[in-house]
Image (cartoon, rainbow, N blue to C red):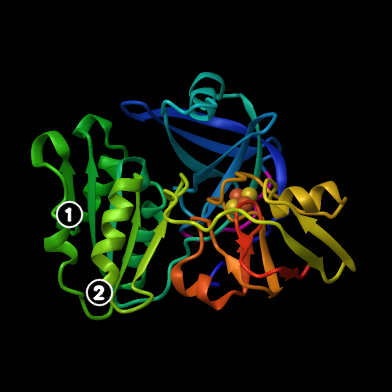
Amino acid sequence: MTTQPIVREFEADLRVVSAVEAATDVVTLTLAAADGSALPPWTPGAHIDLVLGDDLVRQYSLCGSPADADRWRIGVLRTPDSRGGSKAVHAELGEGATVRVRGPRNHFPMVASPRYLFLAGGIGITPMLPMIAEAEASGADWRLVYGGRSRASMAFLDELAAYGDRVTLLPQDEAGLPDLDALLGVPQPDTLVYTCGPSGLLDAVEARCSSWPAGSLHLERFAPRAASGEDEDTAFELVLQRSGLTLTVPADRSVFEVCKAAGVSVVGSCLEGVCGTCETEVVDGDVDHRDSVLNEEEKESNEFMMICVSRCRSDRLTLDL
Ligand code: FES
């Protein structure tokens, strides 16, 4: 897959240097090491984990500049999240607070292209900010279409104003929804589409881009893709090649859970197939990919799988663990 492995093992308590209201229900946090030391490098599209409590880990895109080596910026939308991740960020992470951070990781990397179409919905603007800065710096031809409920709910409008008419703002209460047929109905040559936002937008963009050349569409989800006709959960044998173990994954447990119970070192975060932390190399087996990270080509290549949600259609799955 195209993942860019960036210092995965970094984990530290970072200080909230500033917490600023960027739009209605959106706060931007700037994080830094307590001693001001440099943080791991990252590239546009990367995200970090905030560890907000026991079993409460949330992913947020880095939206500052990779050139700022000693600080990271994220934007967090307050949502009616069942487990309260974003509420905890808004309520507890004021200036001077400390938060456990892991990462960064990048499952949404920029691929070099002469032309980009960026489509952002709501807080999905965050990974786009460093991307458009890079596109601009590289001299690429690019355009951003940014939709939101209303102008007041759309963060970073002041920063985007510097890009002039490359940016189209579509507050829904003034301009309605983006016209995806006009934007994507005809595949554009040498153009890559990058999109992030609510599932409805991503599903609609994905459907429109099905007629585009393979590899044109790049998207990032922060909520699991809706299940669509997945196979029934069945038991299968799990061979861990490096550990020399053969285990059974019953129908009601995940590969991740079975590995963990057997004392095998596996790392997970979201445990719902969206963050990419548990990505594992596949040696053999017909993987039933159920994650929201890998694209279709990556799934077909059968090289990697997200062991927190994906399963196996064949009787045996062999992993490089
Ligand atoms: Fe997030 Fe598996 S732990 S994708």
Residue 256 location in percent, x, y? 72, 52
Q: Secondary structure at mark 1?
A: helix
* Left or right of 217, for residue 238: right
> Residue pushed farthest top?
91
Is residue 72 visible in this depiction of the protein?
A: yes
In magenta stretch: residue 43: yes
User: What's the residue type where badge 2 is placed?
Assistant: Ser
Q: Is residue 41 above or below residue 285?
A: above
Q: Nearer the viewer, residue 107 or 12?
A: 107
* Left or right of 250, for residue 170: left
State which mark lies toward you, 2 or 1: 2
Which residues are drawn in magenta?
A: 37-44
Residue named by callout 1: 164
Q: Earlier in the sequence, mark 2 or mark 1?
A: 1
Asked where in the image residue 198 lies, by quadrant, the reply is: top left
User: What's the residue type where badge 1 is placed?
Assistant: Gly
Residue 84 location in percent, x, y? 52, 25
Q: Is residue 70 above or below residue 2?
A: above
Q: Nearer the viewer, residue 284 or 60?
A: 284
Q: Badge 2, how many Cα within 10 Å: few under 14, some, many 20+?
A: few
Q: Is residue 189 above or below residue 229?
A: below
Is residue 94 visible in this depiction of the protein?
A: no
Q: Is residue 213 above or below residue 269?
A: below
* Left or right of 276, for residue 165: left
Residue drawn where x is 49% and y is 23% of the image: 87
Q: Nearer the viewer, residue 310 or 271?
A: 310
Q: Which mark is residue 34?
A: none
In magenta stretch: residue 185: no
Residue 69 location in percent, x, y? 58, 52
Q: Which mark is residue 211?
A: 2
